[in-house]
Image (cartoon, rainbow, N blue to C red):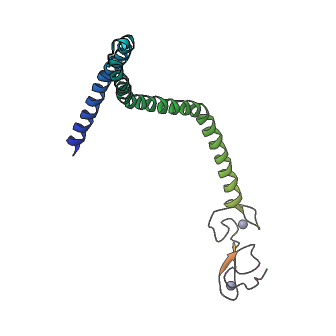
Amino acid sequence: MEDNNKYNLNEKSKARSTLRVLGPVVLVLGIALIIYGISNMFNGSNAGFIGIPLTFVGSVMTLFGYMGSLARYSASQSVPVAKDVTNYMLDGTKESIGLVAGEISKNLHQTQNQKSSIKYCSACHEELADEARFCDHCGVPLFKKCTKCNKENDIDAIYCQDCGAKLEV
Ligand SMILES: [Zn+2]
Ligand SMILES: [Zn+2]
């Protein structure tokens, strides 16, 4: 399968290079015949009439011969250029954007951490551990136990998050 594809490709490029050589030759021949025909018109020569389709065929052959490589050329040229420009523009801004984004996310992370995880004991105002259930300095419980369902709620909760009962202060 792969060999077959390679063979086809080779055949195509071979045909194309033949067209590239043959196309201009036929084209020049056709033009020459037209010129020859025009200059010999009065002698009754038909060469000029052959020259017209020959010129057409030659130009079509040349077009086909060069079209593929032209398309390939423009494709291979424009894509890396566009990529290079984008990369070039990105390279400059990427670092600064990365730095700014890094700073922003770092700051966000810090403020989030400060907001969410750092708690202080309401009794002794010592910093509390993340999941502490009692203050490790004064032993005050850091939860409110629901009298109805025994669910341990946050110390500042007013209603039980499980059964909705009002919690005792
Ligand atoms: Zn405490
Ligand atoms: Zn409850």
Q: Is residue 167 above or below residue 56?
A: below
The stretch drawn in magenta includes residue 160: yes
Return the x and y of residue 149 as percentages of the image width and height. 66, 87
**Among the 4 quarters of the image, the one containing residue 167:** bottom right
Q: Establish if 153 lies above or below 56.
A: below
Residue 31: image location, x then y, percent? 37, 17
**Front residue of 166 and 97:** 97
Q: Which of the 4 image quarters holds residue 139?
A: bottom right
Above or below: residue 140 compared with residue 10: below
- Left or right placement of residue 55 versus residue 151 in this view: left
Figure disc tally: 0
Q: Please state, as top left, top right, bottom left or bottom right, where the C terminus lies in the image.
A: bottom right
Where residue 153 appears, x then y in whole percent? 68, 77
- Residue found at the far right of this picture: 169
Residue at (39% x, 14% y) in the render = 38
Extreme-bottom residue of the structure: 148
In percent of width and height, residue 37 lies at 36, 15
Name the image quarter holding residue 63.
top left
Main secondary structure of the magenta stretch:
loop
Report the span colored magenta.
Answer: 155-161
Name the foreground residue: 115 vs 8. 8
Magenta stretch holds residue 91: no
Residue depicted at 37% across the width and 12% down the height: 42
53 or 49: which is nearer to us? 49
Above or below — where is 68 with respect to 100? above
Left or right, 101 with reference to 14: right
Indicate which quadrant contains ligand 1.
Answer: bottom right
Q: Residue at x 67, y 45 (%)?
A: 104
